[in-house]
């Protein structure tokens, strides 16, 4: 074995002995900017990114002393980035042109995740509850619920109402195709031969009839002593009459000997359980169309949709046939036609009606397709063609608009009156964002002396930005907790507080505190977090005002005294 390893190239040894090629490609750098009302955008190159873009790596203590991080070359041990108690790094460039490895500290995101686990905050899906003022209601659904943590299209649990409808449409189309093949097989070759012979006889009879008329016309002209060239108008009228007669005869033959329409068996939409089939998947196979550029959208149309056009047309025809059948049946039920009293006659009448409703010609199908296209042109996002066929067929996320004229952060520009509903837009990551795996906050904090507590120990939050700034007055104060910036529970216009204590708590972050070292801190309870479509984390906070505040302060005081005593002993 040693002889074999000696003949390996340096690249092969690199692949065997290092994790150089195991590091994933970095994600695109997200924009760290904020837009203001005047159209001014402030950006920062040094601000912490809203989510990590590079893989964080660590090493053992023994390897750290040698500078061995499993890369192409050892990292310098004198760097201040590795001279910490528990260093974690992210590699920005494995091998530069100067033959060095460019790296940076990844402690910002790694420590933030550790703080999140220590706080015990569950991740929820959706941003609607972030705007709720009443925190006593039912908490939102967790990120790991079955209807939210679904990516499969193979089971019925992973399908919504439109997906179930398309699946039933596909099954019904396959049944109709099998029935059509059986009908054609039972027809046999003999009826087709008889049909061709009868059609040929009809055409020969038509030709002989007009041949006799032509001979009679020529005999009439010969009796008058003229030729066909001397009567051009009569000759032109005769030929025009024969052409019209031939066209009418061909249409009559097509209607008489045409193959009957394919048998169509309608289907009823499958039953939908609002609890089971209320799927709000976070990942779709198709792209988010509003997020595609012009070039990406053109490529998607050319490469993905172009090759599935024939398959979609088959589903479209089946959908139109079922719509025509449903419309006819509904119209017959409203017509008030009397059903025979006799059971046998009623069954025969019903079979005849079903046969008439299910007889659908190609012209009627074309008219139905045109009607669907017209409806889609008037209402692109809410039409039947889009919601029941295109979205489930291409497995695209739903596209919905939301009216924002009466929102708190509404803009006066007409272009901003409508925005895409972020509740239906797909997420760029899992709803948990990899921060934690708690489904709810339904757990009890157990104090070592006092026992189980009604509320967990509060978390100190630093006032990052008060409501009143040097230029504007914000609705919420900004609090920093666990490495994240969140809005305060109380608003500047909050009038629903029932006690003076709540009102005073709402006013304690009105202005900046320049007297307290490090800034003012308030005790809060992080209720839950949620991730937006662009990967940013939002936290819902609740002010702590119960006995848990006294318990936490006593614990902090005891720990502080124990720390001082330990320093004296040492």
Image (cartoon, rainbow, N blue to C red):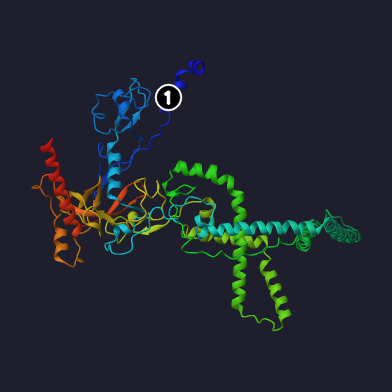
Q: Position of residue 238 (x, y in %)?
A: 80, 59
Tell me: 361 left or right of 60.
right
Q: Position of residue 522 (x, y in %)?
A: 17, 53
**Front-lying residue, 559 or 439:** 559
What residue lies at 71% left-to-right and 61% top-to-bottom?
261
From what the image shows, is residue 268 above or below residue 394? below
Comparing 265 with 463, the one in front is: 463
Horizontal and vertical percent for residue 220?
Answer: 89, 61
- Is 46 situated left or right of 95 in this image? left
- Dot 1: element: helix
Which residue corresponds to mark 1?
Answer: 17
| Image quadrant where residue 398 sits | bottom left
- Crowding at mark 1 (Cα within 10 Å: few <14, some 14-19, many 20+): few
Where's the C terminus, which quadrant? Answer: top left
In the rendered view, does 370 fall on the left or right side of 178?
Answer: left
Question: Residue 53: in sight, yes or no?
Answer: yes
Q: Residue at x 45, y 21 (%)?
A: 13
């Amino acid at each position: 074995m040693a002889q074999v390893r000696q003949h390996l190239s340096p690249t092969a040894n690199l692949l065997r002995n290092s994790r150089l090629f195991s590091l994933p490609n970095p994600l695109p750098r997200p924009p760290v900017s904020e837009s203001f009302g005047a159209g001014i955008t402030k950006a920062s190159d040094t601000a912490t990114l809203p989510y990590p873009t590079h893989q964080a790596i660590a090493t053992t203590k023994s390897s750290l002393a040698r500078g061995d991080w499993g890369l192409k070359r050892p990292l310098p041990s004198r760097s201040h980035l590795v001279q910490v108690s528990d260093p974690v790094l992210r590699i920005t460039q494995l091998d530069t042109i100067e033959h060095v490895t460019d790296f940076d500290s990844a402690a910002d995101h790694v420590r933030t995740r550790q703080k999140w686990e220590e706080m015990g905050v569950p991740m929820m899906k959706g941003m609607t509850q972030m705007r709720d003022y009443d925190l006593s209601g039912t908490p939102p659904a967790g990120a790991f619920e079955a209807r939210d943590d679904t990516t499969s299209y193979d089971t019925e649990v992973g399908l919504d109402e439109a997906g179930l409808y398309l699946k039933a449409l596909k099954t019904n189309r396959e049944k109709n195709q099998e029935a059509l093949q059986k009908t054609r097989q039972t027809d046999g070759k003999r009826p087709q031969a008889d049909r061709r012979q009868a059609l040929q006889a009809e055409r020969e009879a038509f030709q002989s009839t007009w041949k006799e008329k032509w001979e009679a016309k020529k005999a009439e002209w010969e009796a008058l002593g003229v030729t066909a060239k001397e009567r051009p108008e009569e000759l032109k009228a005769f030929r025009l009459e024969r052409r019209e007669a031939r066209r009418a005869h061909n249409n009559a033959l097509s209607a008489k000997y045409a193959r009957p329409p394919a048998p169509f068996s309608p289907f009823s939409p499958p039953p939908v359980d609002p609890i089971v089939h209320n799927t709000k998947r976070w990942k779709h196979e198709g792209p988010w169309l509003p997020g595609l550029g012009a070039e990406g959208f053109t490529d998607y149309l050319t490469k993905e949709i172009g090759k599935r056009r024939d398959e979609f047309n088959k589903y479209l025809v089946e959908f139109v046939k079922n719509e025509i059948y449903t419309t006819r049946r509904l119209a017959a039920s409203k017509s008030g036609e009397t059903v025979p009293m006799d059971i046998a006659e009623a069954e025969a009448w019903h079979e005849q009606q079903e046969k008439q409703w299910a007889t659908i010609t190609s012209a009627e199908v074309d008219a139905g397709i045109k009607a669907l296209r017209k409806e889609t042109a008037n209402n692109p996002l809410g039409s039947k063609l889009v919601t029941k066929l295109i979205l489930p067929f291409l497995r695209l996320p739903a596209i919905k608009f939301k009216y924002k004229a009466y929102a708190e952060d509404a803009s006066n520009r007409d272009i901003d009156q409508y925005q895409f509903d972020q509740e239906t837009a797909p997420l760029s990551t899992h709803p948990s964002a990899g921060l934690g795996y708690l489904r709810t906050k339904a757990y009890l904090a157990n104090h070592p002396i006092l026992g189980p507590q009604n509320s967990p120990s509060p978390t100190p939050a630093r006032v990052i930005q008060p409501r009143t700034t040097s230029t504007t007055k914000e609705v919420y104060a900004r609090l920093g907790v666990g490495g994240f910036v969140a809005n305060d529970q109380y608003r500047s216009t909050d009038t629903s507080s029932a006690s003076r204590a709540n009102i005073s708590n709402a006013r304690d972050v009105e202005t900046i505190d320049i007297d307290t070292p490090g800034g003012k801190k308030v005790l809060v309870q992080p209720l839950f977090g949620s991730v937006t479509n662009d990967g940013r984390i939002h936290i819902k906070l609740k002010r702590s005002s119960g006995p848990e505040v006294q318990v936490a302060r006593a614990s902090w005081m005891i720990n502080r005294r124990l720390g001082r005593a330990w320093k004296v002993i040492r």
